[in-house]
Amino acid sequence: MDACRTRATSSSSPVPRPPRTGYAFAVETHDPLSVGRRLGEIREGLLRLHQSLLDWQRRAHERLHGRMSATELLQVLLHDPEFAWLRPISEIIVHIDQMLADEGTADEDAILVQVRALASPDADGTPYAQRYLQAIQESPDAVLAHKDLLALLRRQRAPR
């Protein structure tokens, strides 16, 4: 019996216990560093998706109007209605950039809701959702970027 006591009490490190919260489960805390890291990952996924969508739209535009320089592309991107459907994804990337730069409290749930909506192609939806559907049907790069973004979103906690 002494051998059993020795084995049970001679453990080199104590067993970690969950924090006591008064509940049967621990309440999730929002660590600003992890929120920033998660938003940074989403931002990177959005940038890759945005680039693939922009490349797809540029190829379609150049088939009709000829090749464009980088300066011409920027002008078309900013002013041509044919590229206007890309603005929602551009805006959410800028919004995430601002949140990460402010290092304040980020509304991660609101961002995730918006990103999930942007990653939802729909033939009967908004002009963005319709063009997005067309892009992922025609562009292998857009499909891969879409898949990667969905994988990132699945790893994120669900909005409350």
Image (tube, rainbow, N blue to C red):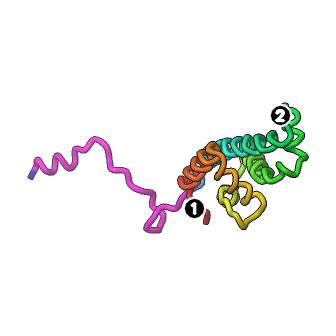
Expressed as whole percent of the image width and height from the top left, the position of residue 146 reads 62, 50
Asked whether disc 2 touches disc 1, contact meaning CB atoms under 8 Å apart, the reply is no
The answer to whether residue 65 is left or right of residue 145 is right
Q: Amino acid at mark 1?
A: Ala
Q: Residue at x 69, y 51 (%)?
A: 135
Outermost residue toward the front? 64
Residue designated by label 1: 158
Q: What quarter of the picture does the C terminus occupy?
A: bottom right
Q: Residue at x 81, y 43 (%)?
A: 61
Q: Position of residue 158 (x, y in %)?
A: 57, 61
Q: Which residue is mark 2?
A: 67
Q: Callout 2, which amino acid?
A: Arg
- For the residue pair 110 and 140, the one nearer the viewer reads as 140
Q: Give the mark nearest the N terminus, 2 or 1.
A: 2
| Residue 136 visible to the viewer | yes
- The magenta stretch is 2-29
Secondary structure at numbered mark 2: loop
**Residue in view at x 86 percent, y 40 percent:** 65
Instruction: Name the spot of residue 78 as percent of width and height, x first.
Output: 88, 44
Instruction: Decide whether residue 56 is among the magenta residues.
Output: no
Residue 94 screen position, x and y as percent: 77, 46
Label 2 Cα neighbours within 10 Å, binned few <14 / some 14-19 / many ≥20: few
Q: Secondary structure at mark 1?
A: loop
**Rendered image: mark on residue 57:** none
